Image: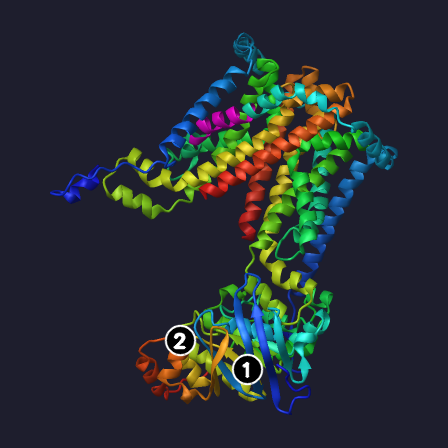
Amino acid sequence: MPVAVRGGGEKLWMRRTRAGDIVAWFGWLVGVAIVVASFELISQVTIWAFVWDAPAQGADLIGRMFPPRWSYASQLWKPMWDTINMATLGTGLAVLLGVPVAFLAAHNTTPSVVFVRPTAIFVIVFSRSINSLIWALLLVVVFGPGTLAGILSIGLRSIGFIGKLLYEAIEEIDTTQVEAITATGAGRGQVLAWGIVPQIMPAFAGITVFRWDINIREATVLGLVGAGGIGMQLQASINVLAWPQVTVIFALILVTVLASEWLSARVRHAVI
Amino acid sequence: MGAAETPPPGLMLQISGLTKRYATGDLALTDVSLTVPDGQVMALIGPSGAGKSTLIRCVNRLVEPTGGKVVLNGDDITALGQGALRRARRRMGMIFQEYALVERLSVMENVLSGRLGYVGFWRSYFRRFPQADITEAFRLLARVGLDHMVDKRADALSGGQRQRVGIVRALMQNPELLLVDEPTASLDPKTSRQIMRLVVELCGERGLAAIINIHDVALAQAFAQRIVGLQGGRIVYDGPPDGLTAEVLTTIYGEEDWSKTMSKVEEDAETEPAV
Amino acid sequence: MEASIALSGGPIRRWRPKPLIENPWTRYAVYLAAILYAGIAFGTLDINWARAAEGFERGGRFIAGFFPPDFVSKRVEITEGLIESITMTVVSTAIGIVLSIPVALGAARNLAPLPIYLFCRAIIALSRTFQEIIIAIVFVAMVGFGPLAGMLTLAFATIGFMAKLLAEDIEDIEVAQAEAVRATGASWFQLLAWGIQPQVLPRLIGLSAYRLDINFRESAVLGLVGAGGIGDTLNNSFERYEFDTAAAIMLIIIIIVMGCEYSSSWIRRRVQ
């Protein structure tokens, strides 16, 4: 007990017992030891000479990146347009597939807890655990380089995201409203449409726009593995060490991402 | 304006010409002057938005006054720099509306937080308070009947218990003056009376002066020695509790049938043991 | 609709649900714009449908190439990659969290003066705008190939993520509790330790567990641009058409990610 009585009847108080103190300090020690050991492993495979050179390298890199070759931008409008489309259509695909999965995964709407729910949850976890770049890597092999692979990889990755957040929202709904609708004699579909859907609409809109915003960011790099969009120009420019072009691409991505973030914040603010 | 530089002995707090205008342009206090003698329990009444909260927060400068002067036992609070202000705050214990305990800390930690102004950062961070503080904390907790709950988390207590922890926290500062902000808001009527009685008793025991913001006129009349009525940021009444007539209440709060409130005051004879 | 029943005898009052967008012109303009966008987006995607159709047949062969997953023949590379990923994750999360705390304090409007606030918000924006891969490209260019670049990337991304969410939490604290601590004469650091830390600590722990999880996932793809980790191994096996090894690596990633997901949600439940 943190309260102890000393000989003279004086009460002592400590936040933890002695043993608790030792456990806490030992825990910190172990944590720090793990981090230091991990860093040691990284450091072994690092060529430190390069790292000490990093400020010079960085300065050199910046030197080569400036001045940006702004004229290159004229070749970037189409890839940027593709990038945005990949994000938007991929998000659309994920909504089409993710919403049913969410309803199948939520324990209060799933038709069967024994089979359907675990399957739906597995789909969600599976989709979430594969990064969209890895999806793209696979799909480029299947469908060839291009935006189709990009759309599909964004869609496949986003199913899990939308499905997870949406099924959590469905499970958190206010059950009395559903009871009230059920009490009017409504059928299953009507209960869904009148008791559940109105409650999750704001969450749904928020989640979708949020994912769209993330997807814009993701879509900018899918081209590095050949899945279309501005990443392909980035890859090409880096391969030929055309750093002034890379600057232009970075600037364009920055503007696009900031714009999409602003838009998504506006929409989420409006629906919540 | 223009208060005496050396206070006559026995004056705990002198407020002169206190004015507060918020950044929004709202004028919360206009030229408020007030003196509180040693050991006096004063109730500050008035409608919501009259400036009660602002007034007591200007005393310990949780809110910076725009103009005027606050003198605590001869020291001009309004002229202090940051470090000196922190030392001055130790001399003024504050009790809050809705308790304002740090919910995730234990009762003992909340009580000991009253000593923060006296111990260094690392000492307080590792909870190594001087044994004298801990002994005092146990004594005060026993005084308010909570010494069996020292390791309960503050959010596990009832409203009355939390407010008693809040009172002990303020007393731990070993203050000269108590600033009490709506201590009974969100408490039931019985607990409200118990808490008010406790505050008044403790002030009596330690010879503390107190300013108590309170919206319940009956409670104010029952427990305070003096009542100050605030309306629109100005003092409109300053006198004994029994001087609160229907006309006075109308100037403070506006037109209303005051007979109900007044009669409640007379029933105020029954006694419950203060906790 | 049914509302008219109550008014039998009076004039018939019709009722239709209120549309989301009040003005019919704007409403139809929005619908039209959406349809138009979808059309143009699809039209300009230049998807090679012949190649895509061929893809399904290819996909079959491709998936067949995955089986059975081969954990054995590249086990040394796989183990090395995994250890690199894990060490990158641990170190970057630790460094990122430690650095994100001061940035979060600076980015909370209720604590920081305006210039510091703007500076910290700028750090957050910079770290969040670019996809990790892009940041990794820059770090690889600066410190050379290997896990150090990956670690720096993840640490940088962690700062933006943690600081933003933590700053929001600090801005949402109960002001009364902090004010009470201030009224005792506490110093600024004591205010942080007594008035703010207890309120935000559960969130900080939850976010840290979540970010550890994210960092591992990301560490699995940073290898695509040479920033070390299991992604390097995965990328190599794809390039050498060793799909059975790739399948094994992906399975390992999925299992670890699922493990992280369950344990991080368990930690978050514990500290609430």
Mark 2 or mark 1, which has the lower sequence index? 1
Whether A177 is among the magenta residues is: no
User: Is residue C252 found left or right of B247 in the rendered image?
Assistant: right
In the rendered view, does A130 fall on the left or right side of A106?
A: right
Circle number at residue B253: 2
For the image, the number of numbered tags is: 2
User: Compared to C35, does C192 lie above or below?
Assistant: below
Q: Which residues are magenta?
A: A86-99
Return the x and y of residue A164 as percentages of the image width and height: 49, 36
Task: Please identify, in this view, whether the residue under mark 2 or under mark 1 is nearer the observer.
Answer: 2
Q: Secondary structure at mark 2?
A: helix
> The residue under label 1 is which amino acid type?
Ala
Magenta stretch: dominant SS? helix
Q: Amino acid at mark 2?
A: Tyr
Is C42 left or right of C23, judged from the image as shown?
Answer: right
**Residue beneath disc 1:** B210
